[in-house]
Amino acid sequence: STSIGSPHAPELLQKVVGYYCSKGYYREALQANNTLLEALDRARMAAGAPLYRCLAAQTILALADGSDVQKADAAFLESLGRDGYAASQQAKAAEDLLQCFKAPDDEAFDDAVASPALQSLDHAVAQVAKALPRPVVVVESAA
């Protein structure tokens, strides 16, 4: 068995996250992704693209799990504390999607889902992002 401190743990956990994503089990994917984050830290791999993909997945999976915008926002803000993440393509992908849910905008949502930044994420997570329900734009009715 692979322990969380094993150098093989991140690769294995990434596959678990991908599996849950493909089945639509977003809460389980989010839990596995949390464990992946811990494994990356323990394996001293918590830098660069693997970390950034994992952090962006936190935000996107929270949006997928019942469109929990507050949870996604909290995850995003917390991840900005990680070295280099704020300037990464992965952070841009997560932030662009998150913004669409905070202030629904059809055009911005289409742009975010088609963004090249989204291609910098793990394939399974990018697929989840593309399948997110379109944020509802609330139109004020003129009384």
Image: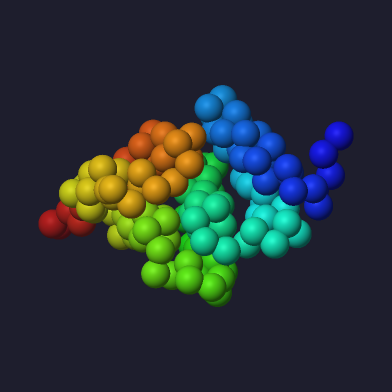
* Residue 85 at x, y percent in the picture: 48, 67
For the residue pair 55 and 136, the one nearer the viewer reads as 55
74 with respect to 120 (left or right): right
Residue 114, x across and y down, in percent: 26, 43
Whether 56 is drawn above or below 64: the answer is: below
Q: Can see residue 125?
A: yes
Residue sticking out furthest to the left: 142
Does 10 appear above or below 130?
A: below
Which residue, as the protein is rendered here, is positioned at the far top?
A: 23
Q: Position of residue 109 (x, y in %)?
A: 27, 48
Looking at the picture, tell me which residue is in the foreground, 28 or 39. 39
Number of labels in the image equals: 0
Quadrant position of the N terminus in the picture? top right
Res 67 visible: no
Q: For the point 64% across and 59% down, which residue is it? A: 45
Who is closer to the viewer here, 107 or 2? 2
Q: Is residue 122 above or below residue 96?
A: above
User: Which residue is pictured at 13% across the width and 57% down the height?
Assistant: 142
Q: How is the image coloured?
A: rainbow
**Residue at 30 percent of width and 44 percent of height:** 113
**Residue 46 relative to residue 35: left or right:** left
Where 22 sits versus 116, above or below?
above
Quarter holding residue 92:
bottom left
Q: Quadrant of the C terminus?
A: bottom left
Front residue of 25/141: it is 25
- Give residue 103's position: percent from left, percent from top: 31, 60
